[in-house]
Image (cartoon, helix red, strand yellow):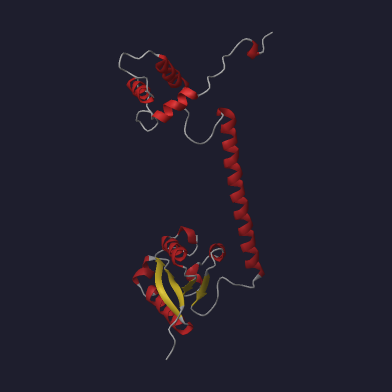
């Protein structure tokens, strides 16, 4: 008796037009994939398809392929079987960039004739993948540097970049005045009372709710801004 297969794979189908969808293209591809899987000891545990999708379209832009990547990353299947290389991608550039995308995930793409599309000794294809990898690394570094530059410029202009916006100084000043007022008989100038008075005056937290007692405490402990004097402006 033949031992039960322990190798798992996913089937990927692609048709390039509505005519292919209505014709025998899907059945032909599926049949070729199933025959190869059976002969090679693979168990097909899923099928994904992109119908009426050009073979020149980048793989990452195809909904069926994207769903298959999610499945791969979620359950550990690391083999994809297609009818032939043209079903994977007809454009050489799309094919090689797709191969690079999958190689980084440790995925193997097999054609129904036994060809391993993720391995090649073709120097031109190897070079293309290396160039694509170098460009992707450059683009990532460029974006990171651009974002860092934007954060640095904002921090230099405003003194801060990320996190919650500070409470306006006018609100802090009002909180201090409220804290200094003499309470009426039987009242107590608590932090919650100050927060309530700020809310009555229309000063609310970013969420639209009254400030919490802890926020009021931070307002009262904030250092007062330095007064601008003639000497500080550099006048003699």
Most extreme residue toward the right, as rendered? 236
Most extreme residue toward the bottom, as rendered? 1
Give percent across and percent down for residue 32: 43, 79
Give 201 or 56, whichever is nearer the viewer: 201
Task: Work out which quarter of the rendered image holds the N terminus and state it.
Answer: bottom left
Q: Quadrant of residue 153?
A: top right
Q: How many marks?
A: 0
Relative to 197, does residue 95 appear above or below in the rendering? below
Give percent across and percent down for residue 2: 43, 89
Res. 167 in view? no
Relative to 119, does residue 41 appear above or below in the rendering? below
**Residue at the (46%, 24%) spot, across then down:** 219
Most extreme residue toward the top, as rendered? 236
Give percent across and percent down for residue 9: 45, 74
Give percent across and percent down for residue 135: 62, 55
Res. 163 in view? yes
Q: Is residue 57 left or right of residue 195?
A: right
Task: Work out which quarter of the rendered image holds the C terminus and state it.
Answer: top right
Give 201 or 148, whichever is nearer the viewer: 201
Relative to 207, does residue 107 appear above or below in the rendering? below
Give 47 or 62, whichever is nearer the viewer: 47
Most extreme residue toward the front, as rendered? 186
Q: In which quarter of the image is residue 49?
A: bottom left
Q: Quadrant of residue 21?
A: bottom left
**Residue at the (45%, 21%) spot, across then down:** 172
**Residue at the (46%, 79%) spot, across then down:** 6
Q: Is residue 107 left or right of residue 121?
A: left
**Residue at the (61%, 59%) spot, across then down:** 133
Q: Is residue 123 left or right of residue 76?
A: right
Give 110 or 172, whichever is nearer the viewer: 172
């Amino acid at each position: 008796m033949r031992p039960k297969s322990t190798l798992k794979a996913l089937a990927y189908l692609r048709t390039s037009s509505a005519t292919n969808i209505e014709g025998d293209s899907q059945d032909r591809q599926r049949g070729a994939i199933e025959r190869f899987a059976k002969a090679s000891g693979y168990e097909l545990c899923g099928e994904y398809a992109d119908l009426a999708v050009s073979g020149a379209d980048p793989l990452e832009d195809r909904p069926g392929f994207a769903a298959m990547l999610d499945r791969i990353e979620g359950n550990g299947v690391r083999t994809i079987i297609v009818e032939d290389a043209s079903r994977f991608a007809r454009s050489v550039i799309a094919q090689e960039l797709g191969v690079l995308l999958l190689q980084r995930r440790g995925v193997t793409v097999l054609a129904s004739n036994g060809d391993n599309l993720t391995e090649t000794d073709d120097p031109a294809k190897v070079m293309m993948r290396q160039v694509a990898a170098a460009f992707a690394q450059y683009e990532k570094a460029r974006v990171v540097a651009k974002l860092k530059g934007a954060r640095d410029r904002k921090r230099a202009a405003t003194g801060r970049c990320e996190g919650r916006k500070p409470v306006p100084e006018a609100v802090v000043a009002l909180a201090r005045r409220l804290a200094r007022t003499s309470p009426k008989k039987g009242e107590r100038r608590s932090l919650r009372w100050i927060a309530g008075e700020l809310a009555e005056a229309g000063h609310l937290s970013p969420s639209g709710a009254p400030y919490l007692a802890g926020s009021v405490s931070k307002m009262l402990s904030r250092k007062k801004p330095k007064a601008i004097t003639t000497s500080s402006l550099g006048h003699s």
